[in-house]
Image (tube, rainbow, N blue to C red):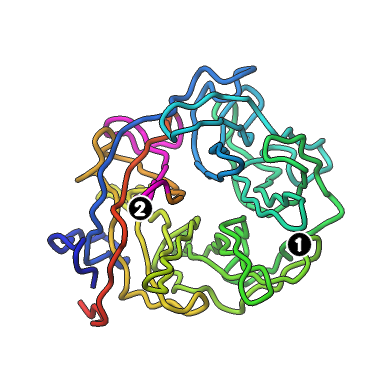
Amino acid sequence: MITSTCTVPAQKRYIDGRPNATYRLSCVDEGVVLKHGDGADSCDTYGAREAIVNKDNGNYYLFYDGAGKTGWLACLAVSKDLKIWTKKGPILTLGDSTKPDSKSASAPWVIKDNGVWHMFYLGTPHTSPAPDRIPAFPYLTMKARSASLSGPWKKQYDVTPFPQKEHSYYSVTSSPGFIVKYKGRFLQFFSAATQDSSGTKRSLGLAKTSDLNATWQLSAKPIFPLTEQVENSSLYFDDSSKTWYLFTNHIGINDAGDEYTDAIWVYWSKDLEKWDTHNKAIVLDATNCSWAKGAIGMPTVIKAGSKLAMLYDASAGNSIGHMGRDIGLAWISLPIKVNKTKNTK
């Protein structure tokens, strides 16, 4: 269990019996720092989601999904302090009707190698009807590259990062996530989902490669059971404790049977390739978010000074819908301490 940051155990239970997180990790919510609606060329008219933050040359670069007039596209905002953002507009465009990203090109995760920024983004040929145009399965991972985080980004349609596979845990979703270089290889914690008669099951998979322009090797099993119902990933490594912290958004279900992104969870492990579902805690949900009491979505974390900054998307008030979301900011004190006693509750 978490020690110095542990509060009362969480008591939430879900109607379908999906697992909950027993403990809470304290964070201080600052509220909305990027509102949707005023992006260039109407790029985020209908919402801002999927915050992904990077830092380069003293600037923070925030990629986020702008729900605009043509669909959901990856957009860019730049900041010096994580609080005041200057929007730069879309950094990706939709592919033509023959391409897998003809309906959405969004959620880009990047890593720099040998002076080149490599981007892995979500593409799909399917969405809900206009004007929402919510991306629909399959969620695919696609590739682009640039000399700069601000672009221009060149799509690499000749690269297929992840293979599709029917009857697998990633049969309908194999979309990008956090990338880290580890023991001479690149690891990517990708979102995975499959469907059966009971609905959609979600988890995270682990992909590996030595060549960022090749097809990755995907793990035979997800790193968590599909019953965990989590998606998206952002990692932080605490060098003092040699512990990895994996932040992800959880998919909950209300009493009416509606699924939605209800919380941000964190898992921790000493081994980047082995994770225990007992070692998890709720970071942010309706009880401690200052402005959102319904949908709270994908987190991204980055160390800023002596604290860990966490950006996330959410809907103001009680909405659990996909649209009209903004980007919020919360702070987590460092170091995060985990004792050696496994939580078995």
Residue 98 in percent (x, y) is at: 84, 42
The answer to whether the residue labelled 1 contacts the one labelled 2, judged by CB atoms less than 8 Å apart, is no
Q: Which residues are magenta?
A: 304-323
Residue 67 in percent (x, y) is at: 56, 29
Q: Is residue 63 above or below residue 283?
A: above
- What residue lies at 35% left-to-right and 47% top-to-bottom? 258
- Identify the amino acid type marked 1: Leu
Residue 212 disc label: 1
Q: Which quadrant would residue 206 be assigned to in this image?
A: bottom right
Helix, strand or loop at mark 1: loop
- Left or right, 82 with reference to 64: left
Residue at the spot of label 2: 264
Residue 234 in percent (x, y) is at: 48, 56
Indicate whether residue 119 is drawn in magenta: no
One can see residue 73 in this view: yes
- Identify the amino acid type marked 2: Ile
Could you classify mark 2 by the number of other residues whose Cα lies within 10 Å: few (under 14), some (14-19), or many (20 or more)?
A: many
- What residue lies at 45% left-to-right and 37% top-to-bottom? 322
Q: Residue furthest left?
A: 8
Helix, strand or loop at mark 2: strand
